[in-house]
Image (tube, rainbow, N blue to C red):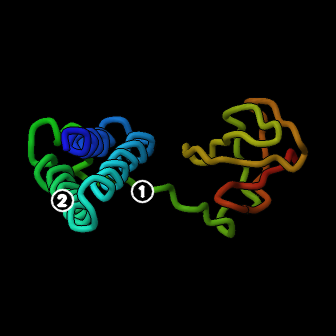
Amino acid sequence: MTTILVLFLVGIIMILLEVFLPGGVLGVLGAGAMIAGSVLAFRDYGFGGGMLAIVAGLFLFGGGLVLEFVILPKTRLGSRLFLSSAVSGTSGAAPASLELVGRECEAATVLAPSGVVLLDGRRFEAFCRDGYAEQGSRLIVRGSESFRLVVSKS
């Protein structure tokens, strides 16, 4: 009986520790310990004892999940472990290629063939058709693709 209880206790502890060391290893080991405890219960106490062990294991597992996902996030420790606010942010809008085609820009970085260009004081990711452009060189916008400008030297 002691071995069965120890296996169940170790299993529950390993499953709960999965919060702190994610990766699945502790959860699998904990589930294995609980299954081993159930097998021992069937062997030592028959069908009734084995079923009781399985029901007790499911109850402990459910209680552990409630503790982990309902109660723990409301504690001081849980507030450090769980994400409680949404990340706010937006991506830059795609450059409107029709408005920018034919305009002159300056290479803010080396384009080999990708880099950054300055156009009206704004930075845009760019791809140089000519393959390479020095920083500071004057370039012409030829279009846009995949949220970046396509530029060439002349």
Q: In the image, residue 69 lies at what x, y percent? A: 20, 54
Kindly identify which numbered label has been placed on residue 90: 1
Q: In the image, residue 83 lies at what x, y percent? A: 26, 47
Under mark 2, the amino acid is Ala
Q: Answer with left or right where residue 102 lies relative to residue 42.
A: right
Residue to which mark 2 is pinned: 56
| Residue at the (27%, 62%) spot, across then down | 46
| Residue at the (44%, 45%) spot, across then down | 24
Under mark 1, the amino acid is Thr
User: Does the image show residue 19?
Assistant: no
Callout 1: SS? loop
User: Number of labelled discs?
Assistant: 2
> Which quadrant of the structure image shows residue 86?
bottom left
Callout 2: SS? helix
Does residue 69 sit above or below 4 in this rendering?
below
Q: Nearer the viewer, mark 1 or mark 2?
A: 2
Q: Are marks 1 and 2 in contact (CB under 8 Å)?
A: no
| Residue at the (25%, 45%) spot, across then down | 4
Q: Answer with left or right where residue 74 lies relative to residue 126.
A: left
Work out whether residue 14 or residue 149 is closer to the camera in this orientation and state it.
Answer: 14
Does residue 154 sit above or below 51 in this rendering?
above
Work out whether residue 103 or residue 89 is closer to the camera in this orientation and state it.
Answer: 89
Work out whether residue 30 or residue 150 is closer to the camera in this orientation and state it.
Answer: 30
Q: In the image, residue 53 lies at what x, y percent? A: 22, 58
**CA neighbours of label 2 inside 10 A, class few (<14), some (14 to 19), many (20+):** some
Of marks 1 and 2, which one's residue comes earlier in the chain? 2
**CA neighbours of label 1 inside 10 A, class few (<14), some (14 to 19), many (20+):** few
| Residue at the (33%, 42%) spot, across then down | 18
Q: In the image, residue 121 lies at what x, y percent? A: 55, 43
User: Does the image show residue 95?
Assistant: yes
